[in-house]
Image: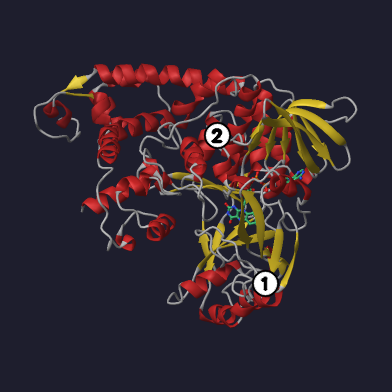
Amino acid sequence: MFHVKQFISYDVIVIGAGHAGVEAATMASRLGAKTALITFKKDDIGTLSCNPAMGGLGKGHLIREIDAMGGLIGNASDLSGIQFRVLNRTRGTAVQGPRAQIDRLQYKENMYQLINNENIDIIFDEVIDVTLETKNNLKRINSVRLSEKGKIICKSLIVTTGTFLKGRIHQGKENWSAGRMGANPSIKLANFFKDQKFKMLRLKTGTPPRLSSNSIDYNKCMIQYGDKKPEPFSFLRESIEKDQIACHITQTNARTHKIINDNLKNSPIFDGSVKSRGPRYCPSVEDKVFKFNSKDNHQIFLEPETLNNEVTYPNGISTSLPIKTQQEFLRTIRGLEKVEVLRFGYSIEYDCVDSIEIDQTFQTKKIEGLYLAGQINGTTGYEEAAAQGLLSGINAVLGINKKEGFVISRSQGYLGVLSSDLTKGGLIEPYRMFTSRAEYRILLRADNADERLTDLGIKLGTVEDKRKAKWLSKKKVMAKAYKKLNELYASPQEYNRFQIKINQDGKKRSAYEVLGYPDTTWDKLKLKWPQLNELNLNKTIERQIKSNSFYNRYTHRQEMEIEELKKDQTLKIRDDVNYQNCKGLSNEVKEVLEKHKPNNIKEARLLPGMTPAAANILLRFVKK
Ligand SMILES: Cc1cc2nc3c(=O)[nH]c(=O)nc-3n(C[C@H](O)[C@H](O)[C@H](O)COP(=O)(O)OP(=O)(O)OC[C@H]3O[C@@H](n4cnc5c(N)ncnc54)[C@H](O)[C@@H]3O)c2cc1C
C-alpha cells in the first residue's frame, strides 16, 4: 500500500484501475518496473461497469491470450464465475468462445487480491494534470499531479480512464456529468488531451436497469443452464469447482414496443441530446424497437449479478428512456409484471482519443513515454481493455529500457488483430472484437492460446513461475505426442479396419494427419495404435492436438487466400456494386465502403476500419 512520503517517483504510473489498468500495472511490475496504480477509490478496482459477464466470441479468445501471457482477467473470471458456457460448442473450435456469468462483487474482491499480490503501489486519488518536459524538441512525460497527494514523477505514464473523460450521463430529459453512475467524471485530465491537441472523438454507450431478483417470477421465464462441466478460462486451472447457477430468458412484446414507441420523443438518443455513436452490436432497446419495427419481440437474458442472486441484469434492454417509461415498459414483460427496479438504465457520452494518435506499442506518437489503453482508445468491452492494458504495460517498460517495442502480429493472436486494427484509426463507433476481424482465425483459437503465446511471455518475463512450470511440462508432453503421431503411418485400408474412414487412395498417412479428420476419435486411433495410450494425455491436450491437426489442413488454404489478396490489389470495383449483398462483411465495414466508394481493392484496403479479413471477403465478392 502507498505511503505518500516514502515514494515520490516511479518508473511506471498507471491511471485507472479498471480492466486495462490492472493488467497494465501487473505487466509493468512483473517486468521489474517500480509501478504505481492510481485510481479514485478502492471500489473502482475491477469494476464491471455494465454486464456481469466475461468472454464470448472473440472476447473469450482475448481472455485466453491475455491469460497465456500471464495476465489476470482469466484467473479473476474463473475465481468469480457463476455460470460457464462455451458458445458455439457445436461448431469448429476456431469459432468457439468461452463465456461466463460473473459475480461482480467477487470479481472486484478477487481482482483486488490478485493485484495486491503483485509489487504495485495502489494510490487512491484523482490525477488532475500531466506535466511534460522537452528534450531535443521532443515532448516526453515528466510527472502527474494528483488532486490531494501532489506531484509524482514517472518515466512512463499509462492512461486507462475508460468512460471517465468528460463523461455525461443521459436518462430521459435529465443529464449530468459523471464517469459512470455514482462516479465523478475526469474533467481536468480531459483538458490535458485537449491542450496537447490530441484528436478526440466523442462516443457513447449504455446500460440497462438493474432489477430486484426477488420481484421476478422466474416460473414464467425460460431457464438457461450453463455447461455441465464448466471450462475454465485460465490455463492455470483444470476445472471449476464453484457452485453454478442458472440464467433465465424472457422477451419484449407488442405492449412493450408500444410504450417505447410512444416515448421515443423523450429518449435522449432520439431527441438529439445525444449525438455520438454507440456500439452497433449493443443497441439500446429503443433503437431495436425503432429500427427493427417488423420484429414482434426481442429476447432478454435475465443474468444474476451475484451468486446469491439479489440483483438481476436484464441483458438486451439497455436504455436511456425516462425512469417512468422504463418502469412502465418493464412491467409489460413476462415474469417482470411486478418487477422492482434497483437502478435505472442510462447512456453515457465520453471523450476518447482517436486511436490514430497511438502506435502499435500503445505509445502516443506526440509524447514519448505516454501510453493509452482501454476505452480511452475508442474500444468497448472489458476484454478489449484488458488486452490493451497488458500490451501497454509491457511496452511502457521496454520503452524505459530503450528496447524494441513488443508487437504481436495478426497471425499470432487476437491481441495483434486488436492493436493493428486500432492503430489504423478511423473508428466511427466503439470497437469490439469479433472472430470475423481475424483473417487467420483458424490458427487463433481459444484452446491453443498457450501454444501461441506463453513462450513469448516467458521470454519477456510476464509469466508467473506456476504458469511457466505448468506450460513447460505441457509443452513437453505435447511435443512427445506430436513426435509419436508423426512417426506412425498406415494405409487407408489399415485405418478402415478400425472404423477410421479416409479416402481409399492407397496413400499412407500419419496418425497426426488422420486425427484431424472429423470422424477420427482418439479412441479409434488408440485401438489402431495401442502405444498411443502410453502418452497418457489428458482430455484437454487430446482435444487441442486434434484441433491443431484438423485446422492444419486449412492453414495452407488460408495462406493462399492472403497471397491472393496481395496479388489482386488493382482489381476494379464496379460503381454499382451493392455492398449490402456481400455476405460476411460487418455492417460497420459496409458503411465505410458505401461512404468512400473505393475504385479498387487497394483503395478499399486502405480505408479506415477495413481489416484484412474484410478485404478478403470483399475480394471474393468482387471477383464473383
Ligand atoms: C454505462 C456503461 C455501459 C457499458 N456497456 C458495455 C457493454 O454493453 N458492453 C461492453 O462490452 N462494454 C460496456 N461498457 C464498457 C466497459 O465497461 C468498458 O469497456 C471497460 O470497463 C473499459 O475498461 P477500462 O479499463 O478502459 O476503463 P474502466 O473500466 O472504465 O476504468 C477506468 C478507471 O479509470 C479511473 N479514472 C478515471 N479518471 C481518473 C483520474 N483522473 N484519476 C484517477 N483515476 C481515474 C476510474 O476510477 C476507473 O477505475 C460500458 C460501460 C459503461 C460505463
The residue that mark 1 highlights is 339
Judging depth in this view, the residue of 374 and 235 nearest the camera is 374
> Which residue shows up at 28% across the image and 41% down it?
565
The residue that mark 2 highlights is 66
Q: Residue furthest front?
A: 137
Judging depth in this view, the residue of 187 and 195 nearest the camera is 195
Taking the image as shown, residue 156 lies to the left or right of residue 188, namely left
Q: Residue furthest right?
A: 5
| Mark 1 element type | loop
Q: Which mark is residue 409?
A: none
| Mark 2 element type | helix
Judging depth in this view, the residue of 505 and 6 nearest the camera is 6
Q: Amino acid at mark 1?
A: Val
Q: Position of residue 551 (x, y in %)?
A: 31, 35
Residue 616 visible at all: no
Q: Quadrant of residue 468?
A: top right
Q: Quadrant of residue 260?
A: bottom right
Residue 435 visible at all: yes
Q: Amino acid at mark 2?
A: Ile
Taking the image as shown, residue 292 lies to the left or right of residue 618, namely right
Taking the image as shown, residue 260 lies to the left or right of residue 555, namely right
Q: Position of residue 491 (x, y in %)?
A: 13, 24
